[in-house]
Image (cartoon, rainbow, N blue to C red):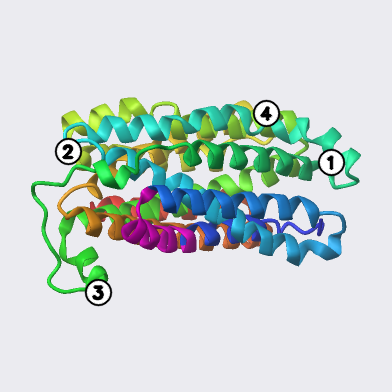
Amino acid sequence: MTGSRATSGVPGATAILGTAVGSALLSFAMARRGRRFGLRLGYAVGLAGAMAALLVTATSSAFPLLVATMFFLGIGHAANQLSRFAAADMHDAARRPPVLGWVVWAGTIGAVLGPPLLRAGEPIAGYLDRPPLSGALMFASLFYLAALVVVGLMRSDPSAIAVEDTSAVATDRPGSLLGALWRLPHVRLALIVMVMGQAAMVLIMTMTPVHARDHGHGLAAVGGIMTAHFVGMFALAPFVGRIVARRGAVPAIAFGLALLIAGAAGAALSPTSGSVPIALSLFVVGIGWCFGFVSGSVLLTRGLAYAERVRVQGAVDAIAWLASAGASLGSGFLLAGFGFAVLCALAGIGVFLTMIFV
């Protein structure tokens, strides 16, 4: 819409910002009125955002409106992310890692279906007299509608059948959520790992399609690269959940960070002539993120009473997605100013510093 590489990360960054704000607001609503209410609210807002985004893509002058609608689409994604905790909290501590892994695994379906819809949406966009890539927003609207219908049919509120943690540690006084984040070592570890891992992954992921298109790769190749990345993010999540259950979260986190560093290095050094090396590198980045994401999420299901867990989970997700928004927004300027290799190197350095902390 703008023809500018520097602004290409702005819509994505705004959507991620919406996910950050939505994580905080929806978790607050869930703590007061239950998981079911929060999920319904989030998916309804996401549906409205996706439909509005499709309507405002007619002209390049509407780019600011597109950016605004992406914020609401991101709130729907916050509901999608918080659903993993809704499922995990309905099980005892031993079962939470694999259950959480299976919910994350469900994202594989979207990972496989999503990128090809870029091309499948082109005829829809042409019929509506919209830019070719905007047709995918029609599918986004339909999927949000499907999610809203499914949650609307839920008979039981997950909050009503959540399993309390027997090691619950109550906060000292109301309103001490931020203190609890730093006072409990496992929460602090989850926060830092999820923030840095998310930021590094988003920094690379956001600009890979732009980098590939700049070097002559078509939509089919870009879709293949991103499918490899998303499969790495989600497909092995049940396996990761079992590793966390058996070996513990900290070893899994360390292994995931090592994979993130390797993937970032591979992406930086991949030749621009072919799409296979960059796809393999993005696949490794996805697996590394998955280890950190699942392990950190499991840590957030422990050591707090249920209502406090809901608030802390939303707060950590909000901070992680704020970091992602910053990475997404800065990625376009880094690519335009320094190139893709430097962008990947910066992501790898951030993960290396995180590994030292772990």
Boundaries of the magenta span: 21-35
Q: Residues within 10 Å of mark 3 (few under 14, many from 20)?
A: few
Q: How far across and how far down the image is residue 323, in percent?
A: 45, 61
Mark 4 = which residue? 274
| Mark closer to the chain start, 4 or 3 | 3
Q: Spatial distance from mark 4 to mark 1, Cα to Cα?
A: 29 Å
Q: Residues within 10 Å of mark 2 (few under 14, many from 20)?
A: some
Q: Nearer the viewer, residue 269 or 283?
A: 283
Q: Give the residue at the far left of this rendering.
A: 167
Mark 1 = which residue? 125
| Mark closer to the chain start, 4 or 1 | 1
Mark 2 = which residue? 93
Give above or below for 57 relative to 253. below
Q: Spatial distance from mark 3 to mark 1, Cα to Cα?
A: 48 Å
Q: Spatial distance from mark 2 to mark 4, Cα to Cα?
A: 45 Å
| Mark closer to the chain start, 3 or 1 | 1
Q: How far across and how far down the image is residue 320, in percent?
A: 41, 57
Q: Amino acid at mark 2?
A: Ala
Would you say residue 266 is visible in this rendering? yes
Q: Are marks 1 and 2 in contact (CB under 8 Å)?
A: no
**Res. 69 image quadrant:** bottom right
Which of the image's four quarters has the N terminus? bottom right
Mark 3 = which residue? 175
Q: Secondary structure at mark 3?
A: loop
Q: Secondary structure at mark 2?
A: loop
| Mark closer to the chain start, 2 or 3 | 2
| Mark closer to the chain start, 2 or 4 | 2
Q: Residues within 10 Å of mark 1 (few under 14, many from 20)?
A: many
Give above or below for 78 relative to 136. below
Residue 95 shown left or right of residue 134 in the figure: left
**Res. 134 image quadrant:** top right
